[in-house]
Image: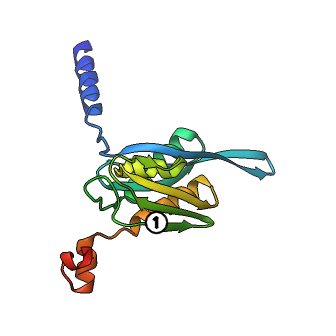
Amino acid sequence: MEKTERTNNKERNNKREFVKKSPYEEKVISIGRVSKTTKGGRTMRFTATVAVGDRKGRVGLGTGKAGEVPEAISKAIKAAEKNVIKVNLVEGRTLSHEAIGVCGAARVLVKPAKAGSGIIAGGPVRNVLELAGVKDIVSKSLGSNTQINTAKAAMEALKMQRDAEHVASLRGKKVEEIIG
């Protein structure tokens, strides 16, 4: 009887090792505490905003709410993995053109930079750009500095990026004509 119990435990332990590992790296952007006042008193809940990315041009942003912080973070990670976008990187290090992303009152300006500049950005914008795999960029946060909206505005700026091949196909021209 004891022998079968041991084998069952071994089988259970082996099954745990096959948990699907996410290909994305994650960074928590913000954690907020929200309280709701009811007749019975205050009930506390937590919100989390998380950015995920593979540092190779894929990045996503998600939010989650739950009664405890770890649950909120795991929900946010799942939401972020569903919202992953592809960013076209020039030479694998920077963006193709400047753009301004807007979310609420937050505006984020992103501009390509020459090699060796590094990521010149702060707070949540820096987290989003690092996880996207951008290595050389200049960024400026304009307007509101709310962490969640600033991160969303950075994502909008990344969504606006178009590479030379895409622009050439839209205009019906060759890439050489576009680049000049």
User: Within 10 Å of the Cα at label 1, are there few (<14), some (14-19), or many (20+) other Cα atoms?
Assistant: some
Q: Judging from the image, what secondary structure is the residue with disc 1 in?
A: helix
* Quarter containing the N terminus: top left
- Disc 1 target residue: 156
Left or right of 126 on screen, residue 107: right
- Is residue 2 at all visible to an observer of this figure? yes
- Is residue 77 at all visible to an observer of this figure? no
| View extreme (right): residue | 39
Q: Name the colour scheme.
A: rainbow
Q: Position of residue 111 (x, y in %)?
A: 43, 61
Instruction: Tell me the residue at 41%/44% (across/down).
Output: 26
Instruction: Tell me the residue at 22%/86% (across/down).
Output: 172
Q: Which is nearer the eye, 30 or 17?
A: 30
Q: Which is nearer the eye, 19 or 5?
A: 19
Task: Tell me if residue 73 comes above or below residue 14 in the rendering.
Answer: below
Task: Tell me if residue 137 comes above or below residue 99 in the rendering.
Answer: above
Q: Position of residue 42 (x, y in %)?
A: 76, 46
Instruction: Tell me the residue at 63%/46% (across/down).
Output: 32
| View extreme (top): residue | 2
Q: Position of residue 121 (x, y in %)?
A: 49, 50
Left or right of 115 on screen, residue 38: right
Identify the image quadrant of residue 17. Answer: top left
Left or right of 120 on screen, residue 92: left
Q: Which is nearer the eye, 22 or 180?
A: 180
Q: Position of residue 60 (x, y in %)?
A: 40, 56
